[in-house]
Image (spheres, rainbow, N blue to C red):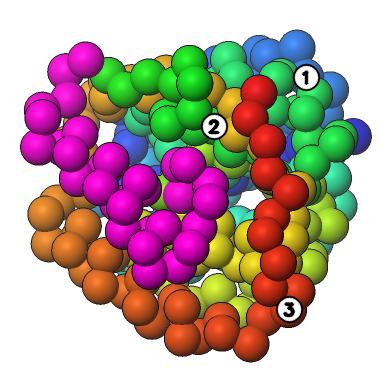
Amino acid sequence: MTTIVVIPTYNEADNLPNITAELLTLDVEDLQVLIVDDNSPDGTGDEAEDLAKRCYPGRLHVIHRPGKQGLGTAYVTGFKWALERGADSVVQMDADFSHSPSYLPEMLANIKDYDVVVGSRYVGGGQLDERWSWWRWFLSWWANSIWTRLILGVRTKDATAGFKCWRRSALERIGLDRINSNGYVFQVEMAYVSEKLDFRILEIPIYFEDRRIGKSKMSVPVKIEAALRVFEIRWRHRHIQPATLPRSAEA
């Protein structure tokens, strides 16, 4: 079974050697990594190319985009690339170690029985980094426990999760061309469409560590924009069928 991990990057050159090393030394059959870089000024794209040639030929791949085009389009680009190359499952995650590669074997073991496996901060056993401020914790909790449930009726406890494993058939059924979110609200749109399509969804608990190196790209304006775009998502996908509750479960 071929698994491709898609990692969008913008100024992650310092994290890249370690995250790719941890991923590509996992005891996982036919695991590959795709870096989707938005012309990072710090040379992330060049670093990825160098690692691909020196350390992981045939296992580390790089897509170079001409500029900063947004998280959502980076993932859609990466997902399509992975499907074209025959991936049976596709993992999405960050480069900054907020998503630990150590959870991948568990995700891949479960994807055999589910359409999407979510690395969740908000199911039993899930944890947030103790260094998070109360305000950051409150915004994340409010977005997942109140806002997305109130406006969209999403049942997934971590609707904004960026750490997921997708079955190939699930991404094909979603129809990636219908996903239009460009920023961090992409995660919410994918969660909402998954539930509208009655996907089998499993949330497994993870420890969400604050980034080790670099600065978070989740500013307050970005969070406000994401919250407002939830209304747009509801309108855009109002005709998707089946409009039934998802077959979700917790680990």
Which residue is located at x 48 percent, y 16 percent?
125
User: Which residue is farthest right?
Assistant: 1
Q: Position of residue 15 (x, y in %)?
A: 36, 26
Which residue is located at x 42 percent, y 31 percent?
122
Secondary structure at numbered mark 3 = loop
Q: Position of residue 209 (x, y in %)?
A: 33, 21
State how far apart marks 1 and 3 are (Cα).
35 Å
Which residue is located at x 78 percent, y 68 percent?
173
Main SS of the magenta part reads: helix
Residue identified by numbered label 2: 119
Residue 123: numbered disc: none
Q: Position of residue 164 (x, y in %)?
A: 59, 41
Tag 2 and tag 3, C-beta contact below 8 Å: no
> Can residue 133 be seen in the rendering of this structure?
yes
Which residue is located at x 55 percent, y 63 percent?
192
> Which label's residue is closer to the chain start, 2 or 3?
2
Residue identified by numbered label 3: 241
Residue type at the position of mark 1: Val
> Which label's residue is closer to the chain start, 1 or 3?
1
State how far apart marks 2 and 3 are (Cα).
26 Å
Q: Residues within 10 Å of mark 1 (few under 14, many from 20)?
A: some
State how far apart marks 1 and 2 are (Cα).
18 Å
Residue type at the position of mark 2: Gly
What is the magenta range? 130-159
> Can residue 15 be seen in the rendering of this structure?
no
Secondary structure at numbered mark 2 = strand
Left or right relative to 140: residue 239: right
Q: Quadrant of the C terminus?
A: top right
Secondary structure at numbered mark 1 = loop
> Which label's residue is closer to the chain start, 1 or 2?
1
Left or right relative to 171: residue 78: left
Residue 28: numbered disc: 1
